Image: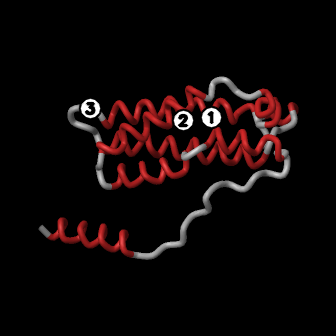
Amino acid sequence: MRLTVLFTALIIGCSTTPVASPPASLPYPSYLPASAREGIARRMGRHGTEMAMMLWGVLLLDVSRLGPLADDIADRRNESDEVDAELQRLLPADFFALEATIGVAARELARLARAPNPDAVAIARIYGAMTETCVRCHDSYMRGPRPAAALLQGGP
């Protein structure tokens, strides 16, 4: 009983505490010309909003919202296989590999969410892996393409 009251208070506290809104998107890095900005905006679409909505689905064990959100992310990653030549040339190579990785993880999260008895911990792990992939991709995107010598040595 105490746990239920504590959990309810925590949920109410989290939902009524005003917090600063996150920025709508990452800033455009200086290496990315204006001509490529529309392409990257189109590519990323609603991704940040979906990840935030999925966070609440994971935290509140609301698997009914997770499947469709994860499918949407996975479907968009698959649709973006046809990379516009300018983005292919300008963005770091690992950007596209990380994008594929998040698509695979999103598909797995959708599968787990639709299981007859969803495993909340497994869902949280996959969501955590997706979030880590997002951070790695954002870091790569902001840093820009690395010189070939750094890639061979595994450097930044």
Q: In this view, does 61 lie above or below 118?
A: below
Whether residue 62 sits left or right of residue 89 in the image: it is left
Quadrant for the C terminus in the image: top right
- The residue at 84%/36% (across/down) is 150
Q: Where is residue 53? Give x, y as percent.
A: 43, 52
Q: Which of 25 and 145 is in front in this view?
A: 25
Alpha-carbon span between mark 2 and mark 3 = 20 Å
Corner quadrant of residue 111? top left
Query: What's the residue type where badge 3 is placed?
Result: Ala
Q: Where is residue 114? Give x, y as percent.
A: 29, 33
Are the residues at dot 1 and dot 2 in contact (C-beta closer than 8 Å)? yes
Q: Which mark is residue 102?
A: 2
Alpha-carbon span between mark 3 and mark 1 = 26 Å
Query: What's the residue type where badge 2 is placed?
Result: Ile
Q: Where is residue 106? Give x, y as percent.
A: 46, 35
Q: Is residue 29 above or below residue 81?
A: below
Name the residue beneath numbered marker 1.
98
Corner quadrant of residue 118? top left
SS at mark 1 in the image: helix
Quadrant for the N terminus in the image: bottom left
In primary-sequence order, the first of circles 2 and 3 is 2
In primary-sequence order, the first of circles 3 and 1 is 1
Q: Which residue lies furthest to the top in this view?
A: 82
Query: What's the residue type where badge 1 is placed?
Result: Leu
Q: Which mark is residue 115?
A: 3
Q: Residue 48 carries which label?
A: none
Are the residues at dot 3 and dot 1 in contact (C-beta closer than 8 Å)? no
